[in-house]
Amino acid sequence: MSSEMLLTATEARRRMRAGKLDPVALMEACIARIDAAESRIRAFAWFDARAARAAAAHCARHGDPEAPLFGLPIGVKDVFDTADMPSAYGSPIWAGHRPRADAAAVAWARAAGAVVIGKTVTTEFATRTPGPTGNPANPAHTPGGSSSGSAAGVGAGFFPLAYGTQTAGSVIRPAAYCGVVGYKPSFGLIERFGMKVMAASLDTVGVIAASVADCALFAGAVSGCDLGEPEARPARAPRIGVCRSPTWDQAAPETRALLEDAAGRLARAGAEVVERALPAAFAALIEAHPIVMNAESACAMGWELAHARTGLSASLLERLTFGLTRSETERRAAYRVFAETRAAFPAATEGVDILLTPSAPGEAPAGLGWTGDPAFNSIWTSLGVPCVTVPAGSGPSGMPLGIQIVGRNGEDRATLAWAEWVSAALSG
C-alpha cells in the first residue's frame, strides 16, 4: 500500500509544494485504502471513485499549488449541502436530495484547493439514530457520533481531513473513540450556512484530522482566521488546570486513570499542573443543555414534523416532543444559565492557559446501536469555547482513549498550540 495514504495533511502539502507528490497520487492512495477497508468500516454515505479521481485530476491540472489545501482530499459530513453529491442528512426523508449549491464550509474548502472525496455517515440529523459505521480500531465498536463517518474515515486513512459538527459531543467524542484529533472551534468560527442546523445556539462546525497542525491548517483555511502553526515550539510550558467537570461521576475507571496519568506526565514534561474545579453554578448546564438543544431542534424540524413525521425515528420524535413541551419559563431559565456561565468562564479559568478534562466517559462501547455519552462534552459546547481532543492511550478492550484540551472563547490559536504541546508530551 502506498505510503502517501498515511501522510498527515501538513506533510502531504509540504511534499506537493516540493514537487514530490501530486493530487492524483494522493487520491489514488486514499482510494486504495477505501477499497481495502470500506466494506468493514462503512464510513461513507456517498462515494464515487470515478468522480473522486476526476476531481483530483482537475485539481492537478487547474488548481493553484500555493492554495492552502491544494489537492488534499476531505470527507464532508452528510449534514452539509453539496452541489455535486446527494445530501440526505442521515435521514430517509431526504434520500436522494440534490442541493443546487455547496454549503459555505464546503465552498470555502474547495476554494482553498481541497478535493471533496465523498460524504460521510452521520447519525439521523446529526442527533439520534446511528448509521452503519464501525470503529476502525475494531468495527464491532461504535466510532461515536454524530460525526461517525468523518472520525472513522480519518482513523482508517480514507482521507486526511474531514468536517464534523458538534451540538453536544459530536466532534470530540468520535475523534477520541477513533484515535484521531478533533477540534471544535469557538462557536461560529466556521460558517454554518448551507448546513442542516438543528440547534442554532449550539451547532458548531469542527474538523477531524490526524494531527493538531492538520486541524489548524484546515480550519484556518476555511474560516479566514490565523490559527498559527501549532508545531512551532512555544517559549514556555503551559499552565494546565485539571478539571474533572461536574460529570466526573460518569467517568469509567480507564478515564479516571488516564486523566491522572496524563496530568503526571505533563507535569514531568515541564507544565505547571494544578487542580481546577468549575464553580458550582456550572453544574446547571447539565440540565440546561438538553432543554436548549431539543427545543431548538424541534423548531428547526418544523417541516419534517408537519410533512414527514413518519420518516422520523421514535427516539428522535421523543426528543423533539420533549423540546416542544418545554415551557417558556424553562427555556428562558436555560438560556440564562448559558449566558451567566459563558460570562463567568474567563474568571473560572484565570491563572491557567487551558483546562485538561476527559474527552469521553471511557473507550468506545461495543455495538453500533449507541454512539456513546456526551457527558464530558456538552458543558463545553454550551459555553461555546474551543476544545481539542488528542490521542492519549487505550482502554481495557484496546480501544483508543483521548484527552480533551479546553480553552477560552476566541483563544483558538493558543488552544491549538497548547493542544499540540500536550499531544507531543503525551506521545513522547
Image: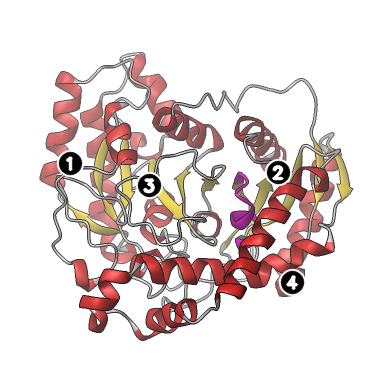
Q: CA distance from mark 4 to mark 1?
A: 43 Å
Question: Mark 4 — residue?
Answer: 253
Q: In the rendered structure, are the residues bearing label 1 and label 2 in contact, judged by CB atoms less than 8 Å apart? A: no
Q: Would you say residue 268 sits in the magenta stretch? A: no
The percent coordinates of residue 243 (x first, y second) are 79, 55
The residue range painted magenta reads 378-387
Q: Main secondary structure of the magenta part?
A: helix
Q: Residues within 10 Å of mark 3 (few under 14, many from 20)?
A: many
Amino acid beneath label 2: Leu
| Amino acid type for the residue under numbered disc 1 | Ala
Q: Amino acid at mark 3?
A: Gly
Give the farthest residue toward the front: 328
* Label placed on residue 426: 2
Alpha carbon separation for disc pair 2 and 4: 19 Å
Q: Is residue 118 above or below residue 286?
A: above
> Label 3 belongs to which residue?
157
Judged from the image, the secondary structure of the residue bearing numbered disc 3 is: loop
C-alpha separation, residue under disc 1 versus residue under disc 3 = 16 Å
- In the displayed structure, does residue 115 sit left or right of residue 69? left
Q: Residue at x 43, y 73 (%)?
A: 140
Q: Are marks 3 and 2 in contact (CB under 8 Å)?
A: no
Distance from disc 4 to disc 3, alpha carbons, whole Å, reads: 30 Å
Q: Position of residue 142 (x, y in %)?
A: 45, 70
* Frontmost residue, 188 versus 245: 188
Q: Is residue 264 above or below residue 310?
A: above
Q: Earlier in the sequence, mark 1 or mark 3?
A: 1
Decide which of tag 2 and tag 4 comes sooner along the chain: 4
What residue sits 60% from the left and 46% below the top?
388
* Discs 1/3, front: 1
Dividing the picture into quadrants, the one containing residue 193 is: top left
Q: Of callouts 3 and 2, which one flags the residue occurring earlier in the amino acid sequence?
A: 3
